Image: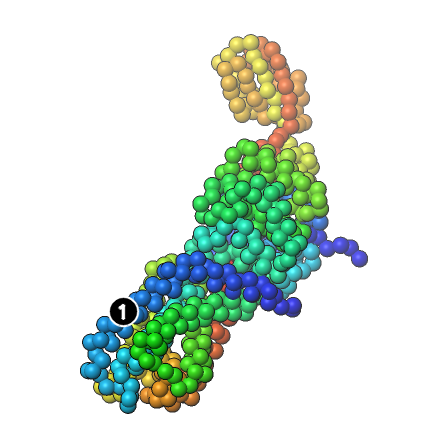
Amino acid sequence: MSTPSAVCFHQVTKKYGDLSALKGISFEVEEGAFFGLLGPNGAGKSTLINAMSGLVIPTSGRIAIQGFDVQKEYRQTRRLLGLVPQELIADPFFSIRELLELQSGYFGLRGAQQKAWVGELLERLALSDKSDANTAQLSGGMKRRVLIAMALVHRPRVLVLDEPTAGVDVDLRRTLWAFTKELHQQGHTIILTTHYLEEAEALCDKVAIMQKGEVKALDSTQALLSKHHYRYLRVTLASEANQLIAPLQARLVEKESNGLVFKLEKTASLSQLLAWLHESQLEVTDVSSRDASLEEVFLDLTAEGGSDAK
Amino acid sequence: MQNNWFGCWALFVKEVRRFYSVVVQTVFAPIVATLLYLLVFGHVLDTQIETYASVSYSQFLIPGLVMMAILQNSFSNTSSSLIQSKMHGNLSFVLLSPISAFEFYSAFVLASVVRGVVVGLGILIVGVIGFDLTWQSPLWVLVFAILSAAMMGGLGVLAGIVSDKYDHLSAFQNFVIMPLTFLSGVFYSIHALPEFWQQLSYFNPFFYMVDGFRYGFFAQSDVSVYLSLSITVLFLILISSINLILLNKGVKIRQ
């Protein structure tokens, strides 16, 4: 018998009046994956992950966490899932430690072992010094760490992070990256939504790109990058380029004083580009080539009428 | 499906700790405000208004004021906690946990009963010490205190669910709870009212809670204590059923 996937979406739709926030989403996230859910604002990412956690009730379709139905078997799915919400939520009545202990209680967890785990979370997320501080008085970065601790208090198998590094400084971003990597290595399935595409490229082994409530692309990060039809060539010139011939102008994506960046079809030859540069009477001093980044793939896919890499 | 009563207990404890953390505002202030009613109305009207035989107006007034405090504070506890949690977003901490709609509702209502009874007890102690108040049937006093607090806690949950902002809750409090409380016989026996207002009082569920509670002190009431008990229980079941349907469907708390 095959092991159920960590998360399975089957024909999930969500309508708010006339607006379709999710239009029949179907895909699976494998057990132990580090999965990136990307898309522009309003793509439906948060709606989808809130539907996983039960904060949003889908209009139709089914979501299962490790085989358990999110609606019918919510007690099991909520024990399996930890959600770090996008909004910086606080409770002005309680300190960090009190909140973590109360949250443990909601899951029916208590005793010395749970107290020790709460202590470990506080330590690991550098919150020990502030454990008695009121959550409403914390900085944004601190609140974000508290939310991560809250999501981990019941040791969930699947951790969902909705824009965890939005608005946090570089140091904290790196700390959070290291922490989520560590959780992944320990066997947790991680689902991450982010606007920082370099973050998704560095962390995620599989990515889904959503737009307007639909999945536009779903593949491993490497496959998605290699499927991209273009590469980027940076050309350094001896002097500033005043005029370019039409084929070069059509492929130009960036222009600096003595440097030009061209977006070139992977099938196009480098000698052809050099020939066009020669025709434009430009002296080339250096040429470097690179593949598309996830950000460029993302922009290409989410542009109106962009190519579908699904 | 397995129950999560420890989770329910944790939520109850959280709700009690929430109001205890601002005890001056949630307990002492309503006790003092209610005692001011007693001081002013009791002093001015003690010889003016006739109530039951061998019962002074101040003695008559105290159970009414105690019940008024229970009703208002039980309602406030659930309604303000829910609306604050919705506005701050921290309600999602509970919604993400494996607590069922029934466990969620029970925890909120039980905490509201605790607050209502604590405030009521504070006023009652002053009444017993200062006004020589005794009770004929402590069991009726206890039954009506708990059932009425639970009903109002439930009504507070309903108001908290349907309200989108503090303004909606304030409207509910000022245009529904306050008039029904003041017109429930807290300050008078409905037999002292003109016929029309007397008849109208029978449609006010709060009247039965005040009247039944008062019966526990004086063994006298405007209507049968069993009728009062039946109507209080009926409203508790009705409000609880509506709440459980809304909570199970996630109306206004899950999108």
Work out which quarter of the rendered image holds the C terminus of chain A and state it.
top right
Depicted A70 relative to depicted B40: above or below:
above
Left or right of B196? Residue A40 is: right
Dot 1 surroundings within 10 Å: few (below 14), some, or many (20 or more)?
few
Rendered residue at 20%/82% (across/down): B47
Secondary-structure class at tag 1: helix
Among all residues in the image, which is located at the extreme right?
Answer: A1
Left or right of B63? Residue A156 is: right
Q: Quadrant of residue A53?
A: bottom right
Look at mark 1 in the image and give the residue it sits on. B36
Q: Nearest the camera: A265 or A240?
A: A240
- Can you see residue A309? no
Q: Nearest the camera: B238 or A236?
A: B238
Left or right of A117? Residue B176 is: left
Rendered residue at 62%/58% (across/down): A110
Q: Which percent across, then down, holds residue B26?
A: 38, 62
Q: Nearest the camera: B246 or A240?
A: B246
Q: Which percent across, then down, holds residue A50?
A: 55, 53
Depicted A6 relative to depicted A127: above or below:
below
Query: Number of labelled discs?
Result: 1
Work out which quarter of the rendered image holds the N terminus of chain A and state it.
bottom right
Rendered residue at 60%/43% (across/down): A123
Q: Amino acid at mark 1?
A: Leu
- Can you see residue B4? yes
Rendered residue at 50%/50% (across/down): A95
Q: Nearest the camera: A304 or B15?
A: B15
